[in-house]
Image (spheres, rainbow, N blue to C red):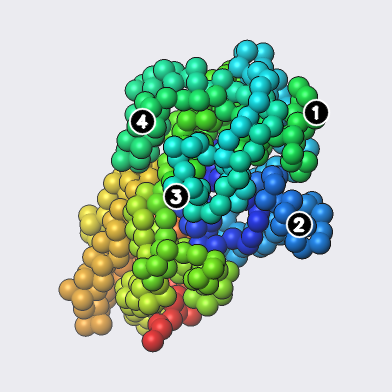
Amino acid sequence: MQKFYITTPIYYVNDKPHIGHAYTTVAADVLARWHRIRGDSVFFLTGTDEHGEKISEAARKNSTTPKEFVDGVVKKYIETWETLQISNDDFIRTSQDRHEKAVAEFIKRMDKSGDIYKGEYEGWYCTPDETFVTETQLKDGKCPFCGREVRRIKEESYFFRLSGYRDKLLELYRSNPSFLSPDFRSEEILNRLNSGLKDLSITRTAVSWGIPFPLDTKHTIYVWVEALINYISALGIGTEKFSEFWPADIHLVGKEINWFHSVIWPAMLISAGFDIPDMVFAHGWWTIDGTKMSKSLGNTVDPVEMSRKYSSDAFRYFLLREMPLGQDGDFSERAMKARINSELASEMGNLLYRTISIAEKYDGKISGQPELDKSLNIQEIDRKVCSLDTFGALEEIWRFVKEANRYVNQKEPWHLEGEALGEVLCNLLEACRVISILIYPFMPSTSMKMAEQLSCTEKPELKNCSFRREAPRPKKGGLLFKKYE
């Protein structure tokens, strides 16, 4: 048994979850579920980032307190993850006491290393992104990340000596090339790093909705600094859980926050004396029908609405099947319907339905020599998932689904009788059983429906993917997926 610790970013609770949040969380869930069926010891963390000036402003606009405001939005996240069948082991909130205590200890460790000093910050600040922006980063005088207005601030601040970590970070990247993943993301990070690092302002005096700075309570900690520490605060510094799971195996993040996770976070960890995670994987963005997703354009995608309309399994499948993890992709309901109709209904659903329909009419023994399993490469599927090629893994699974359908057409079981029919049915029922295990991380409800119709009571585990010489009698249920116009 190996340990596997995977995290999503903690999501900023200024609004309800959209497709971008859902994509990261579903992808992390698929990886966590896959490692569980491998037999690994898994810890899967997600949560919410709840401090900062933007939250205070949103609360004021809604005539409520920041805590009341974030409690309401957090509820929407939890409900969304339940709808999408997310199997997280913990949900960390930065407003929790356990997080604040861990942050205080982490900051004190950084200070003990001599990496924190008091000074004055003057520069540009983007409130919507809670981000400091240098003069050279500005685009037409606006934030380079969101395109909105920035404002000049000048205030007393404590700083982290980030500038002293350039060489250590470069050595980290050299010694662990997979830390910056996928590899085509590394060029941007290296270019910025080679242009030099400046010390990082890590406190604010004008923001009251935040965690008090343990070295000077007139200050609160910059939201991006304390938010990163959630990956440790959820485990609990010095606990048995921390010893078992830290360092994280994968931080799965959107490419827009790659810098924070690939540069600032490892520098903070080195300063505080903690081990470095194995990988930061920065995935791409979604456009909607070819257009950049924007709340003002009204083209955001509600994961709950899509799940209710098409099923959460169909939505999960589409997110992972439409584009390789790491690339940008486009979402359209037309494309999702096409995949539901052709792949989920016509290929996988029809395979199960006609196999069970024929088996129910057969009163002989369902047994025989495995032969269809020769078309299946479990090791290759496992290799692809473990290397975060979930797209390639689904392609490999679907290649086998199509092969099983070709087997039906080739053998024409409706024309067979006796032992010959029993052997073909055994191969087909075993193929369906193995498919139900392989799709479990991607479509957990569909996997369970298939297992029930196949009279399979075992937990989905990769070790059970070998074909057997006898299959139990199935019992037909409803269609797995319906087709859409």
Q: CA distance from mark 1 to mark 4?
A: 36 Å
| Sequence order check, earlier mark of 1 and 4 | 4
User: Which residue in the structure is indicated by mark 4?
Assistant: 190
Q: Amino acid at mark 3?
A: Asp
User: Which residue in the structure is indicated by mark 2?
Assistant: 59
Q: Secondary structure at mark 3?
A: loop
Marks 1 and 3: CB-CB under 8 Å?
no
x and y, in percent, of residue 247 in the image: 53, 29
Q: Secondary structure at mark 1?
A: loop
Q: Secondary structure at mark 4?
A: helix
Q: Amino acid at mark 2?
A: Ala
Q: Secondary structure at mark 2?
A: helix
Closer to the camera, 203 or 23? 203
Please state if 414 lies on the left or on the right of 288 as rendered. Answer: left
Whether residue 44 is situated above or below residue 277 in the rendered picture: below
| Sequence order check, earlier mark of 4 and 2 | 2
Q: CA distance from mark 4 to mark 3?
A: 25 Å
Mark 2 Cα shell of 10 Å, populated few (<14), some (14-19), many (≥20): some
- Look at discs 2 and 3 and give the one toward the viewer: 3
Mark 3 Cα shell of 10 Å, populated few (<14), some (14-19), many (≥20): few
Considering every residue shown, the one lying at the far left of the view is: 410
Numbered tag placed on residue 237 in the rendering: none
Q: CA distance from mark 4 to mark 2?
A: 38 Å
User: Which residue in the structure is indicated by mark 1?
Assistant: 217
Can residue 312 be seen here? The reply is no
Whether residue 269 is situated above or below residue 224 in the rendered picture: above
- Look at discs 1 and 3 and give the one toward the viewer: 3
- Look at discs 4 and 3 and give the one toward the viewer: 3
| Sequence order check, earlier mark of 2 and 3 | 2
Numbered tag placed on residue 140 in the rendering: 3
